[in-house]
Image (spheres, grey):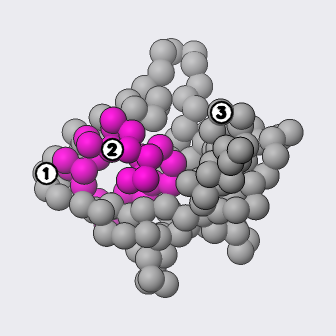
Amino acid sequence: MQPPTYQLFVYGSLRSGFRNPAYEYLTRYFTLQGEAVVKGKFYDKGPYPVAVPGNDDNFITGELYSMKNKDEFAWAIEQLDDYEGLNVEVGETPMYKREVVTVYREAVPSLAWIYWYNGSVEGLKEIAIGDVLKYLQEKNRP
């Protein structure tokens, strides 16, 4: 059994560069450790990219956060689960799932929670660039 994990890896709308309203909530309970990567792939779902785990040499870039007060972790992560749509009605499938993943920050591995896309990526265009911010900047460039 692995020890409890009090870190969170974010790669999309919760990253600091998006300035999403939920980011203020994230920074109330978590401290930014810095940029990090995980093994995974991005796919273009139309309005936004989605990420799925990978076992090869594809990495996605994001930010690693650590919990400020471990006693508040269960409540804080439950709020993020709600933001990510994990709490659905009976019979519905959540769009994301939360899992523990190995994160590499400055080549040092550690464990953190991540929200992976929970749907099929069949038929979606794979995104070669492993950074949502850079991808969206390129995609939306006039």
How dense is the environment of label 1, judged by Cα within 10 Å: few (below 14), some, or many (20 and up)?
few
Q: Which of these two is toward me, 27 or 66?
A: 27
Can residue 14 be spotted in the picture? yes
Give, as a three-letter code, the residue at label 3: Pro
Q: Is residue 78 left or right of residue 56?
A: left
Badge count: 3
Magenta run includes residue 8: yes
Q: Which residue is mark 3?
A: 47
Q: Which residue is mark 2?
A: 23
What residue occupies the far bottom of the structure in this picture? 107
> Who comes first in sequence, dot 3 or dot 2?
2
How dense is the environment of label 3, judged by Cα within 10 Å: few (below 14), some, or many (20 and up)?
few
Residue at the image point whose x is 30% and y is 63% from the top: 32
Q: Percent from the top left, x then y, of residue 100? A: 46, 58
* Vertical relation: 110 (above or below) 22: below
Residue at the image point whose x is 14% and y is 56% from the top: 69
- Distance, label 1 to label 2, CA atoms, is 20 Å
The answer to whether the residues at label 1 and label 2 have Cβ atoms under 8 Å apart is: no
What residue occupies the far front of the structure in this picture? 142
Quarter of the picture containing the C terminus is: top right
Q: Quadrant of residue 60?
A: bottom right
Q: Which residue is mark 1?
A: 71
> Who comes first in sequence, dot 1 or dot 3?
3
> Who comes first in sequence, dot 1 or dot 2?
2
Give, as a three-letter code, the residue at label 1: Asp
Residue at the image point whose x is 53% and y is 69% from the top: 37
Q: Secondary structure at mark 2?
A: helix
- Magenta stretch, residue numbers: 1-30
